[in-house]
Amino acid sequence: MFPSQSALAGLRTVVPMDKIRANAPAAAGDDKPTGVDLYARYAFAGAMCCSLTHGALTPVDVVKTRIQLEPTVYNRGMVAAFRQVIAAEGAGALLTGFGPTAAGYFVQGAFKFGGYEFWKGQLITAVGAENAPAYRIPIYMAASALAEFAADVALCPLEATRIRLVSQPSFATGLVSGFSRLLREEGVIRGFYSGFGPILFKQVPYTMAKFAVYEIAAEKIYEAIPTPKDQLSSGTVTTVNLGAGLIAGFAAAVISQPADTLLSKINKTKGKEGESVTSRLISMSKELGPRGLFLGLGARIVMVGALTAGQFAINGDIKRVLGATGGYEIAKN
């Protein structure tokens, strides 16, 4: 099930060591985790980095969601929207949905980052170590897409709860009450998974761009540094992760913006009786038009750029501390 040690050994033989990039410097000691233990550490690092960054950026996400849902009210830019929310509802409103955000992205981050490393290893084994460098971009994209699908199954109920709390502050007092009411009144499919199509449409291309652009950006940055990667300080590696993550975040934000807008819209209110999710999405897309689908892009670029940079930096540092250094980012010969 897991990538074989012979496959990884083959990768080490075929690809020169100065062409293999680790997310963080290897931890001290000879005993390195493998198999389930290794992937559990990847998953925990991913869970922590996603939960911390998304939780910290809850105020930005609240404002972004308000701009998307009420463009006639919040129509003077991001800073002005912050002031409007505080003036109307108090500063505490900026933390609306913090619980579902932190919990949802903890689960999602575990599946996303842990799954990415798992599927990347599986695909390296499938294509063969000697072919892996030539197929590195398809490997990055396929591994991230597979990981994201599973992550979205776990995330969708909590994301639906978060959006309902942000769009209707009186709906519930927090995560547990909001989750329970949504389940009770609308059921699993309509309440939690009406936005599953849009969230896949948003998150899968977003994650494919996020990981592929990050990997290539980090590769190019390391190539420009004269000091060998394994001789760089942990602070330098963290800085590279931040820079590559920022570039990846900007690209991912633009690619996934239309689906993010539709996701916010479809989770705002109940659908009409008998109306399918697909028909709702088509109707909303026509109503919004191309310009409307990119509402809130400025706020989202700030948010996604910052959180993606933070995620890769935190993820790399946690993996280093945990000794989870068995992963490979394959640079082309």
Image (spheres, helix red, strand yellow):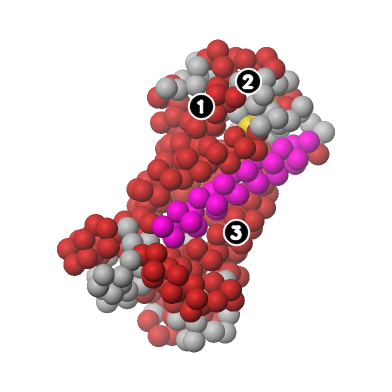
Q: Is residue 53 above or below residue 178?
A: above
Q: Bounds of the magenta span?
A: 197-223
Residue at 51% from the left image edge and 43% from the top image edge: 145
Numbered badge on residue 255: 3
Which three-letter amino acid code belongs to the residue tagged 1? Gln
Residue at 58% from the left image edge and 41% from the top image edge: 141
Which three-letter amino acid code belongs to the residue tagged 3? Ile
Crowdedness near tag 1: few (<14), some (14–19) or many (≥20) residues, C-alpha within 10 Å: some
Q: Is residue 190 above or below residue 14?
A: below
Quadrant of the image containing the N terminus: top left
Residue at 40% from the left image edge and 24% from the top image edge: 36
Read off the residue under disc 1.
122
Q: Is residue 301 above or below residue 32?
A: below
The residues bearing labels 1 and 2 have C-alpha atoms spaced at a distance of 11 Å
SS state under label 3: helix
For the residue pair 163 and 231, the one nearer the viewer reads as 163
Earlier along the polypeptide chain: callout 3 or callout 1? 1
> Hey, which quadrant is residue 140 in on the image?
top right
Crowdedness near tag 2: few (<14), some (14–19) or many (≥20) residues, C-alpha within 10 Å: many
The residues bearing labels 2 and 3 have C-alpha atoms spaced at a distance of 31 Å
Quick check: is 220 in the magenta stretch? Answer: yes
- Residue 203: x, y in percent? 49, 53
Whether residue 89 can be seen here: yes
